[in-house]
Image (cartoon, grey):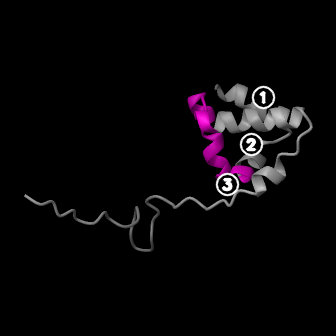
């Protein structure tokens, strides 16, 4: 789905990019970064289309989403004080 079509679906759902990101547990910048590529990943496109259709049919989607226990994503390579780029990967011991 193109980013423009994604925004159309969000509009049909009555959502902004920020509200959609909050709803699915993403950082809003991560969602808006797809504008640069011009396309959104299929899983986000499906979610946006389903929410838009539910909204168009008068079905409340918030209770459905709230039933799902969202676990925050683990940050990848975040910096730590005195260390740029987070922790180094441990050495892998490969058998001969």
Examine the image and state in which quarter residue 11 appears. Answer: top right
Whether pointer 2 and pointer 3 mark residues with C-beta atoms closer than 8 Å, the reply is no
Closer to the camera in the image, 40 or 51:
51
Indicate whether 77 appears above or below 16. Answer: below
Closer to the camera in the image, 88 or 83:
88
Secondary structure beneath dot 3 equals loop
Percent x, y of residue 32: 66, 41
What is the distance, in whole Å, between disc 2 and disc 1 at their CAs? 11 Å
Examine the image and state in which quarter residue 10 appears. Answer: top right
Which stretch is magenta?
A: 22-43
Q: Nearer the viewer, mark 2 or mark 3?
A: 3
The residue that label 3 is drawn on is: 25
- Mark 2 or mark 3: whose residue is earlier in sequence: 2
Left or right of residue 33: residue 48: right
- Whether the magenta-drawn stretch holds residue 28 is answered as yes
The residue that label 1 is drawn on is: 8
Secondary structure beneath dot 1 equals helix
Determine which of the numbered discs, if any, sits on residue 17 in the image. Answer: 2
Percent x, y of residue 92: 21, 62
What is the distance, in whole Å, between disc 3 and disc 1 at their CAs? 20 Å
Closer to the camera in the image, 49 or 26:
49
């Amino acid at each position: 789905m193109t980013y423009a079509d994604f925004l159309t679906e969000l509009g049909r759902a009555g959502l902004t990019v920020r509200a959609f990101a909050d709803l699915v547990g993403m950082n809003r910048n991560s969602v808006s970064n797809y504008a640069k590529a011009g396309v959104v990943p299929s899983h986000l496109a499906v979610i946006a289309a389903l929410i838009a259709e539910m909204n168009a049919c008068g079905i409340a989607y918030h209770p459905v989403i709230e039933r799902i226990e969202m676990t925050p994503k683990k940050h990848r390579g975040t910096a730590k004080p005195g260390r740029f780029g987070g922790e180094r990967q441990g050495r892998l011991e490969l058998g001969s």
